[in-house]
Image (cartoon, helix red, strand yellow):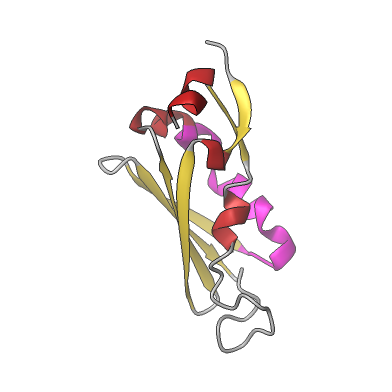
Amino acid sequence: MELIEVPLHAVAHSRAGDKGNRGNMSLMPYDPALYPLLAEQVTEARVLALFAHRGATRCMRYDLPLMHAFNFVIDDVLEGGVNGSLNLDGHGKSLSFRLLGLTVRVPPSAVARA
């Protein structure tokens, strides 16, 4: 099967939130058929590496196969959290945009459907 490399935002949606110094991000493919491919490629290790520059220390991925979605919980990514950070985005709402910049390999038809 031919695969092309695209940014995650071409095939999925994400939302972000916070709990203290912990970021919480959902990831949902536009096409549920992409769920297994994303499960292989968007790993805890890749997501943790993506946020290492912010001091992230751990990433846990919760798979929600009946919803064709993932939930990532990333420790120490908010530079102290809402009340403790001088960061302009203390809630971490923009972190989902960084996640959606991660590249994945998908069939060309998946991008056309998205």
Foreground: 111 or 57?
A: 111
* Residue 13 point in image, percent of width and height: 46, 47
* Predominant SS along the magenta part: helix
User: Is residue 45 shown in magenta?
Assistant: yes
Q: Is residue 4 left or right of residue 40?
A: right
In the image, what residue occupies the spot 28% across and 44% down? Answer: 67
Name the residue furthest top: 1
Q: Could you say which is closer to the camera, residue 48 or residue 23?
A: 23
Q: What residue lies at 25% left-to-right and 41% top-to-bottom?
A: 66
Q: Position of residue 74 (x, y in %)?
A: 54, 62
Outermost bottom residue: 83
Residue 87, by quadrant, is bottom right
Q: Residue at the location (70% across, 59% down)?
A: 52
Q: Is residue 25 visible?
A: no
Q: Is residue 73 above or below residue 66?
A: below
| Residue 27: % across, % down | 44, 48
The segment highlighted magenta reads: 38-57
Residue 17, x across and y down, in percent: 46, 68
Q: Residue furthest right?
A: 53
Quadrant in the picture for the C terminus: top left
Residue 22 visible at all: yes
Q: How many numbered markers are drawn?
A: 0
Residue 10 colored in magenta in the image: no
Q: Residue at x 43, y 27 (%)?
A: 113
Most foreground residue, 105 or 48:
105
**Height in image: 78 above or below 113?**
below
